[in-house]
Amino acid sequence: MRRRHLLGSLLLTPVLTACFASTGGDSSLKKSDGSRLRVALAFPPAENLSPYGADATLLSRLGVTEGLTALDANGAAAPALAASWRRENDRTWLFTLREATFQDGSALTPATVAAALTHATEARPAPAALSGVTLTAEAAGDAVRITTKTADPVLPLRLSSPGLAVFAAKAYGKGGHVDPVGTASGPFELTKVNGSASATLDRFDDYWGGRAQASGVDARFIADGTARANAVRTGQVDIAEAIPVAQAASLDKATLNETATTRTTSLQLNTKKGPLKDPKLRAAAREAVDGSGLVKGVFEGYADPGAGIYGPAVTWAGGKRVPPTGRASAAEPNGTAVTLATYDNRPELPEVAQVLQQQLQKAGFKVTLVVREYSRLESDALAGKFDAFVGARNSLVDTGDPVGVLASDYTCDGGYNLARLCDSKVDRAVAEADAVADTGERQDAAMRAEAAVLGTDAVVPLAHQSIIVGVATDVRGVLLDPYERTLVGPGTRR
């Protein structure tokens, strides 16, 4: 297996990017000063850039949105729109705001923040970061008081989620619609969206963290991985995310940037309806899968074998992992027909699915493969219209809290429950973990909850991925992090 390096020099969190403000301190700089950045993203908007679903990460990666907090390089909560916070009691926190302005010119106020968080709690489906959480927010002088129904010791982490970004009052319309164009607070202002093809962003000159060095961003949504790699190679874009491993060797090494992530590629099995509702058939599917061959053959060493929901980039997980218990004995598939779905925005996934199709058929299943672009697949996947689903999920992207992904993906009320799992033992284990405040003890409890999930065979971890980003040699300050929340910020320039 190849040796991989975390690119520490590029690992910058949003809260630290103020040090990359334009040099010279010349307040007369115009938006035309500085080159524009050309960026290719792998995922077109799936929900009209709603901040409450998968599109929330698109907005944060482009430097459009911010929450009250951010994640630092160690995965801890750091100040963002909130300058500081303190816990008043088990259920109540007070967040003091910094002085900041929204892109529509209105001021960041406690009332605006409280209203924004209230809108998030009313969104349907709920943002993944709020899975299983009930909170209320109210203005309190120069601060915002947030109260949760039950004790939430990781609320500052939770509020760092891209799905809990804060917008100006004018962003919120009828029916829960949120318009991010010109209403966020980040260093780049979204000015135009061309459907699922492209977006235009200009520098927001009044950004509290300092004026961005680039005058704007021209983003293209390119689902085809080979096309993204070619765009970097031919100089059509400056930055391209999610370069396929098959294309890595064709890029100039100077443009190739790799970093370990907390992303895991998994096989999700439908536990609610269809043939895999039977735990014995799920056990048969798990036993049929060989993840080590996928790492070597499909990922070409840019991954580690699937060890669990959390991979080696979650550095504490390996030493705390608990063996799954209560697994059913495997039954003979005897030609059981199943539908296996995946998406092609991450070009390795269709190849992974093809290998899995072969492995499952060898074990006695009859497998129909469905491959679509993600925005055309997500709603059907969440509705449980497939028997099995291959996806790549960053386990810490929603909250930075290891319990958060378990609550959103594997509990009865989870908002991103692709496996349709509803198991009382799992819900109890997740709830117990969520009640623990001490960091080490919370990690231990999260691993017990992981074991409970894996014991149901609702999910089969396949590989823990690195990401490859193509970056032109004249570009500096790209923001790469294991959580994949950031890409461009104030200091990104060429």
Image: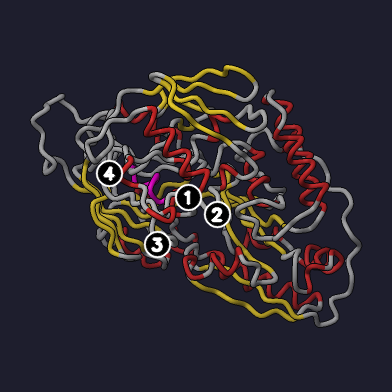
Q: Residue furthest right?
A: 329
Residue 260: x percent and y percent?
54, 43
Q: Relative to residue 464, is residue 164 depicted above or below?
A: above
- In the image: residue 494, left or right of residue 5: left
Amino acid type, callout 2? Pro
Q: CA distance from mark 2 to mark 4?
A: 38 Å
Q: Is residue 3 visible?
A: no
Residues at badges 2 and 1 in contact (C-beta under 8 Å)? Answer: yes
Which label belongs to residue 52?
1
Q: CA distance from mark 3 to mark 1?
A: 15 Å
* SS category of the residue bearing label 3: loop
Residue 25: x percent and y percent?
15, 24
Which label belongs to residue 475?
4
Q: Residue at x 66, y 28 (%)?
A: 151
Which label belongs to residue 44?
3
Q: CA distance from mark 2 to mark 1?
A: 8 Å
Residue 162: x percent and y percent?
46, 43
Amino acid type, callout 1? Tyr
Q: Residue furthest left?
A: 28
Residues at badges 3 and 1 in contact (C-beta under 8 Å)? Answer: no
Residue 462: x percent and y percent?
68, 57
What span is colored magenta in the figure? Answer: 58-63
